[in-house]
Amino acid sequence: MSFAKHLLLSDIAYSAWANQCLLDGCSAFTGEELERDLRVSHTSILATLRHFYDGERVWLPSLRDTPDLGTFLLPQGSAPALSLDVLKQSWSKLWYDYRHWLQNQSESSLGVELTVQMPGSGPRLPRWKILRHVLDHSQFHRGQVVAMIRALGHCPPAINRMDYWLANEPARPTYGVDKLNYCPMGRRPRTINPMDCFRSFHSQCALPKAFAPSSLRRKPAPESTRES
């Protein structure tokens, strides 16, 4: 396997892991919180999750089913109003289908151009560029969901790529928990502690001061204990 194909497979695995972390984190929120209009992206956490799930869903047939040099008609319209539970069930199969498709592709087929028919345009793009668009689109919206979780006053899961590598590093202990629940902050299971979230140097798990209770804000050290 070439290094380029290995990177794409790694990117698919990372994207699936990051999506799963978000879904698991959002499972603790109320229905009102998931659908609250936060004036970000597609207005709410749930609507934004639906949007980029639907993006991954509609692009897969273009990669898998469109013949070489063929034309793919990009579907238009809003994403189906799926519940969080349905997203969790459906998304895992989608990740498997992407991985299975890519594993069975030759290097040359990834460079074959397809015509993507969109309103007012029909660009020709190689399969690997379409896949990169899908992955980058999901990454973009995951960042928005993280911002919305913070806006609700909650601590978002740590989903940077380094978190993924640490979570899946064989040499690291997982303390008997699933790797998806492995928290790189302090090397312990991802049980959210507001004090840890606020005080951690880890940017992915830091609450904005506006949402942090005053009791959690770092207080100045007494004069006697400060370094000279």
Image (tube, grey):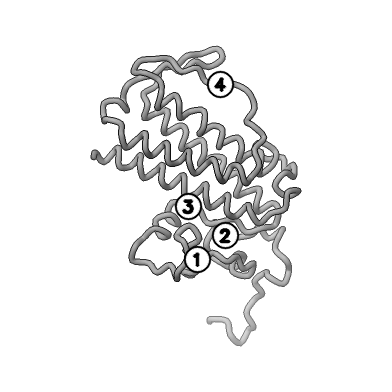
| 3D distance between C-alphas at marks 3 and 1 | 12 Å
4 and 1 marks in contact (CB < 8 Å): no
| 3D distance between C-alphas at marks 1 and 2 | 9 Å
1 and 2 marks in contact (CB < 8 Å): yes
Residue at far top of view: 120
3 and 2 marks in contact (CB < 8 Å): no
| 3D distance between C-alphas at marks 4 and 3 | 30 Å
Tell me the tag on residue 75.
4
Which comes sooner in the sequence, label 1 or label 2? Answer: 1
Callout 1: helix, strand or loop? loop
| 3D distance between C-alphas at marks 4 and 1 | 41 Å
Tell whether 154 sits left or right of 93: right
The residue tagged 2 is: 205
Callout 2: helix, strand or loop? helix
3 and 1 marks in contact (CB < 8 Å): no
Q: Amino acid at mark 2?
A: Cys
